[in-house]
Amino acid sequence: MEINQEDKMNYNELYEKKTKNRLEALKILSKIYLEKGYKYIRVWYEGCGDSGECFHAEGWKGQIDLETKDENGYYPNTYESIAWNHNREENFDEWKNMTRNQREVHKIFKEFSRNYQDLLTSNDDLQYVLADMIDYDWYNNDGGQGEVIWDLNKGTIKIEGQQNIQSYNEITTTYNMSGNKIEQTFNSELQER
């Protein structure tokens, strides 16, 4: 049995090749989105335990505002999920609550991917193609969260994410029962587990 050249590559070389192919395909795709008036494509992701989820790619024709928080200190509408047809209604529109052009972005990608599947090296939707570019562990153990922002005009893909870790502070408390004295030391430096 003959081993093909790709099997001989180490993991890093194979990853680099797949990433270059994916970027080549995305460069072509960006022209299509720009022609449709889009400035940004964004994908939210989060996960922990042994699973991760990314939400349908959003298409933004204007500026993305992530600085404004609601009265509880949270970013409002950080992501939108596709609707689930719990009652098995006929002609159910799973995209009905999506307000960020997810349906059109998805449709454009599906049409595009038929012709460029060899470069994408994945049968997934656009959100998974972009989330596959995250090269740190965001879905195992303590997980992580963030967003992938594809700036179509600049030709950049930026991952703004967080990787969660467990940490601890060292605290020692001693109660002196004879003198009602309490001694406590608190090390404010976080230690990583």
Image (cartoon, rainbow, N blue to C red):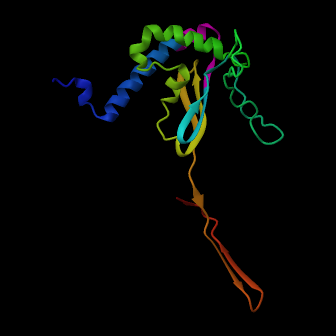
Q: In the image, what residue occupies the spot 50% across and 34% down?
A: 134
* Residue found at the very far left of the displayed protein: 1
The magenta segment is: 30-42
Quadrant location of the N terminus?
top left
Q: Nearer the viewer, residue 48 or 41?
A: 48
With 7 as the anchor, is 135 left or right in this view?
A: right
Please state the total of marks drawn on the protein image.
Answer: 0
Percent of width and height locating residue 71? 84, 40
Q: In the image, what residue occupies the spot 49% across and 23% down?
A: 129
Instruction: Determine the image quadrant of residue 104.
Output: top right
Instruction: Determine the image quadrant of residue 4.
Output: top left
Instruction: Find out whether residue 119 is within the magenta segment.
Output: no
* Residue found at the very far bottom of the displayed protein: 178
Q: Nearer the viewer, residue 169 or 153?
A: 169
Residue 162 visible here: no
Q: In the image, what residue occupies the spot 64% across and 65% down?
A: 188
Q: In the image, what residue occupies the spot 34% across and 35% down?
A: 12
Percent of width and height locating residue 113? 48, 12
Asked if 49 appears above or below 119 in the picture, the reply is below
* Residue found at the very far front of the displayed protein: 87
Asked if 78 appears above or below 165 in the picture, the reply is above
Q: Nearer the viewer, residue 22 or 132?
A: 132
With 116 as the anchor, is 128 left or right in this view?
A: right
Percent of width and height locating residue 10? 28, 34
Q: Nearer the viewer, residue 173 or 22?
A: 173
Percent of width and height locating residue 7? 25, 28
Instruction: Find out whether residue 40 is within the magenta segment.
Output: yes
Residue 100 visible here: yes
Asked if 123 appears above or below 111 in the picture, the reply is below
